[in-house]
Image (tube, rainbow, N blue to C red):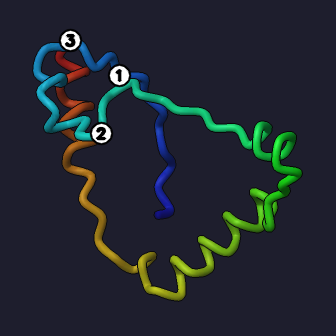
Amino acid sequence: MGVRAEIVNVDSTYPGLADGSVFPFGAGASSIYANDKARNDLDWAPTYTMRDGLEMTYRWWREEGLDQEEWDFSKDDEVLRRVSRI
């Protein structure tokens, strides 16, 4: 926290990055979900707006003290080291 982030696009096919240790959930696997079908077919509407949901999640995260935890960014550092050598 309090550190300016640099956005880096990493090609997961670089040697040494595709073994699953750096991207355990699958690199490049982006998912986009929409609730249009539920809205139209079921006449459903979300209870909370995206903003309200994120705000409640953040508030919970802080109340649980998760903002005080040590976070391990060693895998991120490993990716940046590998990419900088290419």
Please tell me which residue lies in front, 14 or 33: 33
* Quadrant in the rendering for residue 50: bottom right
In terms of sequence position, does the residue under pointer 1 or pointer 2 come before the other?
1
Q: Which residue is mark 1?
A: 10
**Along the horizontal axis of the image, is 18 left or right of 68?**
left
Type of amino acid under label 1: Val
Image x and y of residue 58, in percent: 60, 72
Image x and y of residue 2, in percent: 50, 62
* Quadrant in the rendering for residue 81: top left
Q: Residue at x 48, y 33 (%)?
A: 7
Please tell me which residue lies in front, 8 or 52: 52
Q: Which residue is mark 2?
A: 25
**Does 30 sit above or below residue 49?**
above
Type of amino acid under label 2: Phe
Q: Quadrant of the C terminus?
A: top left
Please tell me which residue lies in front, 8 or 11: 11
Q: Which residue is mark 3?
A: 86
Label 1 neighbour load within 10 Å: few <14, some 14-19, many 20+: some
Label 3 neighbour load within 10 Å: few <14, some 14-19, many 20+: few
In terms of sequence position, does the residue under pointer 3 or pointer 2 come before the other?
2
Q: Residue at x 24, y 59 (%)?
A: 72
Image x and y of residue 41, in percent: 83, 41
Q: Secondary structure at mark 1?
A: loop
Q: Secondary structure at mark 2?
A: loop
Foreground mark, 3 or 2? 2
Image x and y of residue 60, in percent: 56, 81
Distance from label 3 to label 2 (Cα)? 23 Å
Type of amino acid under label 3: Ile
Q: Residue at x 62, y 79 (%)?
A: 59
Distance from label 1 to label 3 (Cα)? 11 Å
